Amino acid sequence: QVQLVESGGGLVQAGGSLRVSCAASGLTFSSYAMGWFRQAPGKEREFVAAISWSGGTYYADSVKGRFTISRDNAKNTVYLQMNSLKPEDTAVYHCAADRTGWIKPPVVAETYDYWGQGTQVTVSS
């Protein structure tokens, strides 16, 4: 049974930093591409960042230069380091796993096979 469990969310002031993590189990993590999406209240889920099995990365324009996605295959964990946070970054952050490894576009939610429940990130102004 595949499980993705996010952690590390919380409340932070604008301009601050936060790192969220996603621990995966029940899959061969090193062969999966991973992604982060977020969903704010009343808004659609949006792509944030993705990382391929080999470490290639891709970011949404809104977070480029502020967020960094990384992975530790030994720990079956993917991370999202978020710096210079803004109130508009407030959302529930979900990680997702893609077994096709970027054969499908990484920015599309339907690409991903498994999803975590999410962790809340709140940025105060």
Image: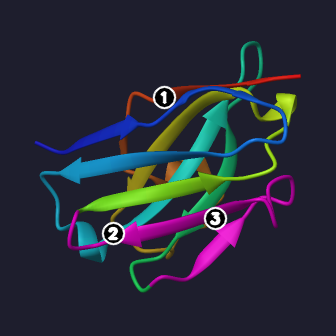
Q: Label 2 amino acid?
A: Tyr
Separation of marks 2 and 1 at Cα, in angstroms:
21 Å
Mark 2 and mark 1 lie on one chain; the one further toward the N terminus is: 2
| Position of residue 65 measured from the top left corner of the image (x, y, whole percent) | 81, 67
Mark 2 and mark 3 lie on one chain; the one further toward the N terminus is: 2
Depth check: give the residue in front, 100 or 13: 13
| Position of residue 110 measured from the top left corner of the image (x, y, whole percent) | 53, 47
> Residue 11 colored magenta?
no
Q: What range is drawn magenta here?
A: 55-75
| Position of residue 50 measured from the top left corner of the image (x, y, whole percent) | 57, 64
Disc number at residue 32? 2
Q: Label 3 amino acid?
A: Thr
Q: Secondary structure at mark 3?
A: strand
* Residue at the extreme top of the image, as rendered: 42
Residue corresponding to mark 3: 68
Residue corresponding to mark 1: 119
Q: Residues within 10 Å of mark 1 (few under 14, many from 20)?
A: many
